[in-house]
Amino acid sequence: MKLSIIVPVYNMASDQKLEYCMDSLVNQAMEDYEIIAVDDCSTDQSYAILQEYARRFPDKVRAVHSEVNKHQGGAKNIGLRMAQGDWIGFIDSDDWITPDMYPKLIARAEETGADLAGCDYCLTEEHSMQVGKIVPNNKREQSGPLNTEKRRSLILDGGSLVVKIFRRSMILENGLWFPENIFYEDNALGNSYLVLAKHFEYIEEPMYYYYQHDSSTVHTISTKRCEDRMAAGRLMLEEARRHGYYDEYKPELEYSFTLLFYINTLFTYMAGVGSTKYGFVRAMGQEMRRTFPDFMQNPYYQERTHAEEKKLIRMQQRSTLFFLLYYKLLWAYRRWRKTRKND
């Protein structure tokens, strides 16, 4: 079989989100592929919808039900164990793709000998094939046989896994199983999926539609999700050590960890969690310092981190209490300014 498309599904029955995704998959302009849709113990009608697609398209769709909710990583692992395709594609069940996305990616990969291929995506707030805001997912210079410089670039700017295809043999040979029971599983495994490839091909065309709505993972902030992002950061470093690329790419991994574990978590936690806890913020800063004592001297940190964020991070590293007081006062002042401006 040429391709296995793995779709983790959890509570996507409303607003025809799941149908729009599945319709785009069953209408791919190619033969010899399978869609493995894994329902992750949904509490709505998602599994019933998947069963209907399996009935209508028995040669394409396999509907699987997990009795235990394992989050997207667990659902992806179920799909990987069942997959028969030479190529693997992952897609979020609230997104959709053009009819020629997978045929184009496979054709480019096979004609160049690549074991990894990807494209761009666009952001959209409506169910249509109208191209929204285009987001370049990779860089032209990352394409081709991978060397040290290209792998460094992919660690720093690898882009999303859902707009890529991977040789199944590469995944299985390296044991690239996703962590289960946490969010941000792609962040934990993403570097290995990219760095362990030998050749990457990039098509500069938006063929993936990334649906923007309030219930998606990136728009939902809670202490649990912040903890999961931190866990994904730890797993990212474990993966690099397990596969032997930690030392060679330590500066890139240090910055990636700083961004994932600390910067993104700290500021989303402060902005999005109603009741912030001193102990949580303090422990986060302490672990960051233990893991990479000199992270603020990292060249990528120096170059890519906004000046105001650097100021706040220095403050938090010196005194969590002062940081919390300052941040809350700053946030209150900005809300007051906004209110005055709107009056």
Image (cartoon, helix red, strand yellow):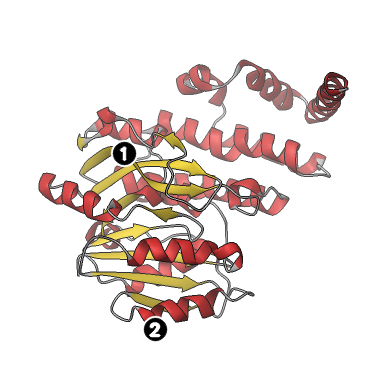
SS label for mark 2: helix
Quadrant for the C terminus in the image:
top right
Q: Is residue 248 left or right of residue 309?
A: left
Q: Is residue 294 visible?
A: no
Residue 268 point in image, percent of width and height: 68, 38
* Tag shown at residue 205: 1
Q: Is residue 318 visible?
A: yes
Q: Nearer the viewer, residue 288 or 179?
A: 179
Q: Amino acid at mark 2?
A: Arg
* Tag shown at residue 55: 2
Q: CA distance from mark 1 to mark 2?
A: 33 Å
Image quarter for residue 118? top left
Q: Is residue 261 above or below residue 299?
A: below
- Residue at horizontal 44 percent and vertical 60 percent from the top: 178
Image quarter for residue 36? bottom left
N-terminal of the two: label 1 or label 2? 2
Q: Is residue 17 above or below residue 193?
A: below
SS label for mark 1: strand
Image quarter for residue 157? top left
**Dot 1 surroundings within 10 Å: few (below 14), some, or many (20 or more)?**
some
Quadrant for the N terminus in the image:
bottom left
Mark 1 vs 2: CB contact within 8 A: no
- Residue at horizontal 75 percent and vertical 36 percent from the top: 270
Residue 113 point in image, percent of width and height: 13, 47
Q: Amino acid at mark 1?
A: Glu
Residue 228 point in image, percent of width and height: 61, 52
Outermost residue on the bottom side: it is 55
